[in-house]
Image (tube, helix red, strand yellow):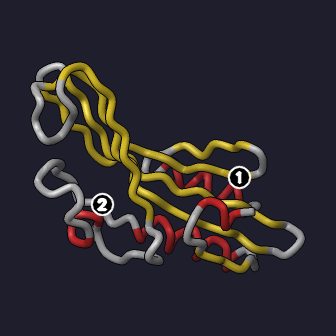
Amino acid sequence: MALLDKIREFAKTIPAEVKESKDTYTLEFVLAERKAFLTKQKLTYTAKFKIDESSKELRFTEMLKETGIGLSSGDSDMSPGFGFKAESYNTSSGAREGTIEEQSKIFGEKYSYNFDYSSVRKKLEELSKEESYNFKYVLTGSGLQ
C-alpha cells in the first residue's frame, strides 16, 4: 500500500478527510465547538503535508485555527454587533508535545476537549518511515514547497 493510501486509512480513524490541492494534502477536523446566543465558534486542527517522490520525503506542518461568526453583545470574544472573527495559531516554535489543552493557554476556559495532536504528527512520521520516506517537520506552510 502506498504512503498516501496509508495516511488516508489513518485519517478515517480520527475521523478526518484528506484533501488534495496543487500537490499539497490537507488533513483537517474540528476539535471543539462552542455555541452561544446567536454565535458559533469552532477550533480546528489542520495538518498539511507534501509527498516528494523524487527525494522520498514527506514535509509536514500543523496548526490550530479558531473561527467564529455571529451576533455579539460586545463581550471579549467577539466585536460588538454582527461580526466575524477568525484567528489562527500555528506551531511556529517547532513541534509541540502533549495535548493542546496542556500546552496552550491561548484558548483558556473557552473549549472543553482533550486531543493529543502530536499523535497525528507521530503517526505520519511512522507511516513515512515504514514506506522508506524521510519525514521533515516544517514551521510554516511555505516550507512545504
Task: Depth check: give the residue in front, 59 or 107.
Answer: 107
User: Which marked residue is nearer to the observer: mark 1 or mark 2?
Assistant: 1
Where does the image place residue 106, in percent across and percent down from the top left? 23, 60
Where does the image place residue 76, in percent across and percent down from the top left? 13, 41
Indicate the secondary structure of the residue bearing disc 1. Answer: strand
Task: Depth check: give the residue in front, 46 or 87.
Answer: 87
Task: Depth check: give the residue in front, 64 or 121.
Answer: 64
Residue at the spot of label 1: 24
- Mark 2, residues whose alpha carbon is within 10 Å: few (<14), some, or many (≥20)? some
Residue at position x 29%, y 64% in the image: 100
Q: Is residue 111 left or right of residue 123?
A: left
Residue at position x 21%, y 32% in the image: 79
Q: Is residue 123 left or right of residue 102?
A: right
Is 39 drawn above or below residue 124 in the view shown?
above
Residue at position x 65%, y 77% in the image: 135
Is 66 drawn above or below residue 115 in the view shown?
above
Q: Quadrant of the N terminus?
A: bottom right
Indicate the secondary structure of the residue bearing disc 2. Answer: loop
Image quarter for residue 17? top right
Q: Is residue 55 left or right of residue 31?
A: right
Closer to the chain start, of discs 1 and 2, is 1
Numbered-mark total? 2
Where does the image place residue 16, in percent across and percent down from the top left? 48, 45
Where does the image place residue 133, in percent across and percent down from the top left? 74, 76
Is 31 drawn above or below residue 36 in the view shown?
below
Mark-to-mark CA distance, 1 and 2: 24 Å
Residue sitting at the far right: 54
Residue at the spot of label 2: 115
Q: Quadrant of the C terminus?
A: bottom right
Q: Amino acid at mark 1?
A: Thr
Mark 1 vs 2: CB contact within 8 A: no
